[in-house]
Image (cartoon, helix red, strand yellow):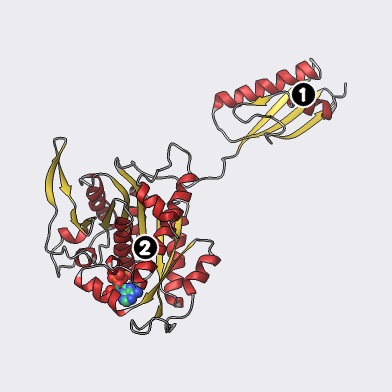
């Protein structure tokens, strides 16, 4: 007895795959069919390791061949399990009320990560989103100064019978900082797990209320402290800040690699180029590329990450940080526009990222005011 391979494939084509609207051959589950005399070997490749589904497939194959080809055929079915492309997933417990947690990172220190975080936050708030900042920069928490709340301390409030930390609020942004819990001028040595625990408390034991975005200002670098933080918080995506010069770019690349490594797997929403050029405020048309031109923009192309936009080096941006009033609060200035453009891109990338997640894990942006602002070009 010689069994015809074409007939076997035709028989396998009668088995439909649940939820796909295709048969087993069309869907690519049948990888190979071999026949020797009265023996048939069918190789299947499936995406599920579930035993009952594998068993069902094996039975279906045998039945189809016996029914449509030959009742006496000796059928052997090999099943290989191959995981589908791994999509980024949100790790850890989702936080009720907080829709998106975005980590802002930089490979190198001093490139303006906290400045960008503060200005993204006030821009999001101006667009109508509900925003918080968690300042996780254990080496030098600067968000309290940038929001002029250095002297304040979070109060304790009672939420459903539990005592919770109430974030300090200014310019429509809720802030909690590791700096609120350390004495000024006192160096604190944190180990990764300790920092992660403190941050977990600032997230889970705080009364954030409803937030569309919680921005996390990470410490500079890519050490084990980052691994602890990233693995314990349910991060939606990350933004990497870099200046255009090579030393900063090399570190930014490491930062992106950190987010993309398998144990972290946090999508990079994009790269921001800070200090892209120097521009004197009285001569805004003059641009001096003192740290090099478009370094971060080129890097984003190289590593296939979205480019969110650029911020010039401007004296008033430094001054506004020092006096505790983020520059993006200004109205109708080039800096306000620059931060608006970057924020819109970031929101758009967040929407794109959430769409690519399975529906149960996708996190929706709820404030329509913010969403319409995205479309307003
Ligand atoms: N585009 C800019 N123009 C002018 N000054 C800037 C700009 N960006 C940042 N600065 C200033 O540079 C200094 C460092 O910025 P910032 O604290 O934001 O950096 P950082 O990357 O968060 O630093 P670190 O994480 O190492 O503490 C601050 O004084 C800030 O005001």
Q: For mark 1, give the secondary structure.
A: helix
Residue 110 shows in this picture: no
Q: Nearer the viewer, residue 245 or 200?
A: 245
In the image, is 372 to the left or to the right of 184?
A: right
Q: Which mark is residue 213?
A: none
Q: Is residue 312 above or below residue 364?
A: below
Q: Is residue 162 above or below residue 40?
A: below
| Residue picked out by circle 1 | 11
Q: Earlier in the sequence, mark 2 or mark 1?
A: 1
- At x 42%, y 55%, the residue is 374
Judge the density around disc 1: few (<14), some (14-19), many (≥20) Cα neighbours within 10 Å.
many
| Residue picked out by circle 2 | 105
Task: Point out residue 71 in the picture as x, y percentages from the top left corner.
Answer: 79, 15
Q: How many marks?
A: 2
In the image, is 238 to the left or to the right of 186?
A: right
Task: Point out residue 27 in the picture as x, y percentages from the top left corner.
Answer: 68, 34
Q: Does the residue tagged 1 have its C-beta within 8 Å of any atom of ligand 1?
A: no
Q: Does the residue tagged 2 have its C-beta within 8 Å of any atom of ligand 1?
A: no
Q: Nearer the viewer, residue 307 or 280?
A: 280
Where does ligand 1 appear, by image quarter?
bottom left
Task: Point out residue 173 in the picture as x, y percentages from the top left corner.
Answer: 24, 56
Res. 192 image quadrant: bottom left
User: Do the numbered discs 2 and 1 sit on residues whose CB atoms are within 8 Å?
Assistant: no
**Quarter of the N terminus within the rendering:** top right
Judge the density around disc 2: few (<14), some (14-19), many (≥20) Cα neighbours within 10 Å.
many
Task: Point out residue 178 in the picture as x, y percentages from the top left corner.
Answer: 21, 59
Q: Is residue 317 above or below residue 307?
A: below
């Amino acid at each position: 007895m010689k069994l015809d391979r074409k007939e076997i494939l035709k028989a396998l084509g009668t088995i439909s795959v649940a939820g796909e609207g295709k048969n087993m051959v069309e869907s690519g589950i049948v990888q190979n069919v071999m026949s020797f005399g009265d023996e048939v070997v069918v190789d299947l490749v499936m995406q599920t390791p579930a035993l009952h589904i594998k068993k069902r497939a094996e039975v279906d194959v045998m039945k189809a061949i016996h029914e449509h080809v030959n009742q006496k055929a000796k059928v052997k079915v090999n099943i290989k399990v191959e995981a589908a492309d791994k999509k980024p997933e949100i790790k850890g417990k989702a936080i009720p009320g907080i829709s998106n947690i975005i980590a802002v990172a930089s490979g190198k220190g001093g490139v303006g990560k906290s400045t960008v975080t503060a200005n993204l936050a006030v821009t999001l708030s101006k667009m109508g989103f509900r925003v918080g900042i968690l300042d996780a920069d254990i080496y030098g928490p600067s968000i309290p100064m940038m929001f002029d709340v250095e002297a304040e301390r979070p109060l304790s409030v009672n939420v459903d019978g539990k005592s919770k930390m109430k974030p300090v609020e200014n310019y429509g942004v809720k802030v909690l900082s590791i700096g609120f819990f350390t004495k000024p001028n006192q160096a604190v040595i944190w180990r990764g797990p300790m920092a992660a625990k403190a941050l977990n408390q600032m997230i889970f034991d705080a009364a954030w209320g409803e937030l569309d975005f919680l921005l996390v200002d990470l410490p500079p670098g890519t050490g084990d402290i980052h691994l602890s933080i990233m693995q314990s918080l349910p991060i939606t995506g990350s933004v990497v800040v870099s200046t255009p010069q090579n030393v900063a770019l090399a570190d930014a690349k490491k930062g992106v690699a950190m987010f993309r490594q398998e144990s972290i797997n946090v999508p990079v929403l994009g790269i921001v180029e800070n200090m892209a050029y120097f521009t004197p405020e009285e001569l805004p048309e003059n641009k001096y590329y003192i740290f090099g031109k478009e370094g971060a923009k080129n890097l984003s192309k190289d590593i296939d990450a979205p480019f969110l936009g650029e911020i010039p080096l401007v004296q008033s941006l430094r001054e506004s940080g020092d006096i505790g009033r983020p520059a993006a609060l200004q109205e109708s200035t080039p800096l306000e526009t620059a931060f608006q453009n970057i924020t819109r891109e970031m929101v758009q990338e967040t929407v794109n990222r959430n769409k690519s997640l399975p529906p149960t894990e996708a996190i929706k942006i709820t404030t329509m005011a913010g969403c319409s602002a995205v479309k307003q070009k």
